[in-house]
Image (cartoon, rainbow, N blue to C red):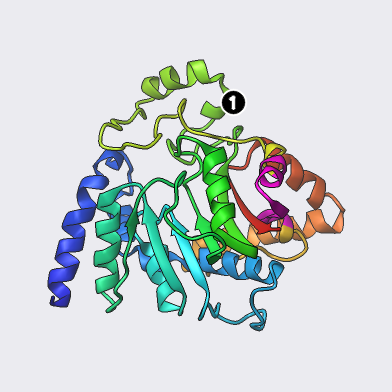
Amino acid sequence: MEQTSIDRELEQAIDPWLEHMRWRSDFKKWREGRIWQENKQQAKLATLETFLRLADKTTDAPDSVPNLTGLKVLDLGCGMGGLSVALALRGATVTPFDFNPAYCHITRLRGYRYGLKLNPVNGAGEKLPFPTNYFDVVICMDVLEHVQNTESLLSEVSRTLQAGGLLYLTAINRLAFDDPHYHVKGVNWLPRGLANGYLQLVGRSKDNSRFKDNQTLEAMHYFRYGELPKLATRHNFKKLFEYGEVNLNQPAHKSSPTSTREKETHSWKEQTVQLLRATKLLGPLYHLYRNFYKGTYQLALIKN
């Protein structure tokens, strides 16, 4: 299949799954990011590198590009395949897995761009069709909130991970000020019984009829931070690291700013962090931010 033909088929496969987001003022640019999703994975790979070090699964130098060669990775909830392709291009043996068969097709097409023969598996995370103690790493990003049963999902992830294996997990804060899915400020500070009406009032309710997993706000699973260590312990994970806390004593990974405005914003933020660190307020203020404001937790869980 010629490159232009692959790109055209990929765009045609992706576009129907973007229609519900046309309210975005930056829709054209956002769509382009979805089409070329594999090129926007640097931050996730850098976070994975940090987590692999915590799990003692890499000996790379601190500033090196992640060397994933030889690692068996399950991309659970691979979505449109951007991360799966980026991981495979860095040498990992990747198994993409998604509940949506259309996303599996998109992931396969995205791999074709680079001559990769990915074999996405369609199924539910609560019943993984993989052997026990099989994977070195499981990545489960933007999935936990959508499944039917979070306990069953984590039980299956734990079963399929090797001892000492790494789970790179994201979870949504129940008190996230700016909701990561509906992009509405303050909606999570309302009782759930009022939230849907508020979303309709501000014109951000969605037609989720094409999705078969949990997509409405009242159906999704969000968590207070204090619930997460208990959740990990119940499923045979011995340690839990939160990315923001891991990086309290060093700058968190950021993509390089490209515009003058972005550089000014980064400079202002860096100066503020330095001031808070010097006054010993960075840790306490970050913990308040993490518990009562932050949108998405990035977590590393190490299996017993």
Quadrant in which the N terminus is drawn:
bottom left
Query: Left or right: where does residue 276 sit relative to residue 74?
Result: right
Residue 134 as seen in the image, left or right of residue 224: left
Q: In terms of depth relative to the viewer, which is nearer, 176 or 153?
A: 153
What residue span does the magenta drawing correspond to? 229-245
Amino acid type of the residue tagged 1 in the rendering? Trp
Asked if residue 222 lies in the magenta stretch, the reply is: no
**Number of numbered discs visible in the structure rendering:** 1
**Does the magenta segment cover residue 234?**
yes
The percent coordinates of residue 235 (x first, y second) are: 65, 46
Image coordinates of residue 194 in percent, x first then y, are 49, 16
Res 98 visible: yes
> Which quadrant of the rendered structure holds the C terminus?
bottom right
* Residue at which label 1 appears: 189
Q: Residue at x 69, y 37 (%)?
A: 227
Q: Nearer the viewer, residue 244 or 303?
A: 303
Circle 1: element type? helix
